[in-house]
Image (cartoon, grey):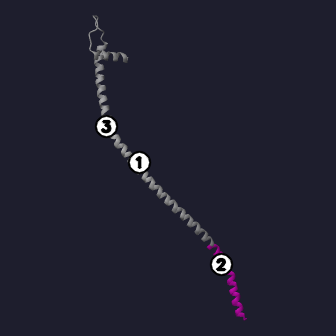
Amino acid sequence: MSLIEWAAQGALLLLLAIAVPFGWRLERQIAALRREGAAMEAGAAGISAAGDAAEATLARLRATAEQAGRNVAERVAEATPLREDLRFLTERAEMLADRLDGLVRQARPAAAEPPPAAGPAPRSEAERELLRALRGGR
């Protein structure tokens, strides 16, 4: 072998000695990328499953909200006539209370007067009941 061949083989040996550590390093990085790629795929699958679960939950929540809205609308529809009835009864009770108050005010001066000495004057049944109610309330 000639000197040129020896020099070429030495240079080749030197280049191989330099390339081998780079190859090992590259092989470790490729293995790490494969491991990380599998973990990334597992993470992406987990995110996809979580997204599907969230969509299903939102659909159930939307259905529940719609059902609750319908229930509230039904109850409002049922309550509206009752509110009107209650308003009517309240107005009527106020009128009757005003009327009763007027009757009580009219009866008080009559009740405050002392009875005549000759004896009590004959009274109607309604007056007697009103006087009994007034005396019972005191």
Give residue 120's position: percent from left, percent from top.
28, 8
User: Quick one: which residue is furthest to the bottom in this view?
Assistant: 2
- The secondary structure making up most of the magenta span is helix
Which image quarter is the C terminus in?
Answer: top left
Mark 1 vs mark 2, foreground winner is: 1
Q: Would residue 21 be counted in the magenta stretch? A: yes
| Above or below, 119 relative to 12 | above
Task: Name the disc covering residue 110, or none.
Answer: none
Task: Say which element carries label 2.
Answer: helix
- The 10 Å Cα crowd at callout 3, few under 14, some 14 to 19, many 20 or more, is few
Name the residue that disc number 2 marks: 23
Residue ID at (71%, 87%): 10
Question: Could you tell me which secondary element the residue under label 3 belongs to?
Answer: helix
Above or below — where is 30 with respect to 61?
A: below
Amino acid marked by disc 3? Glu
Magenta residues (range): 1-30
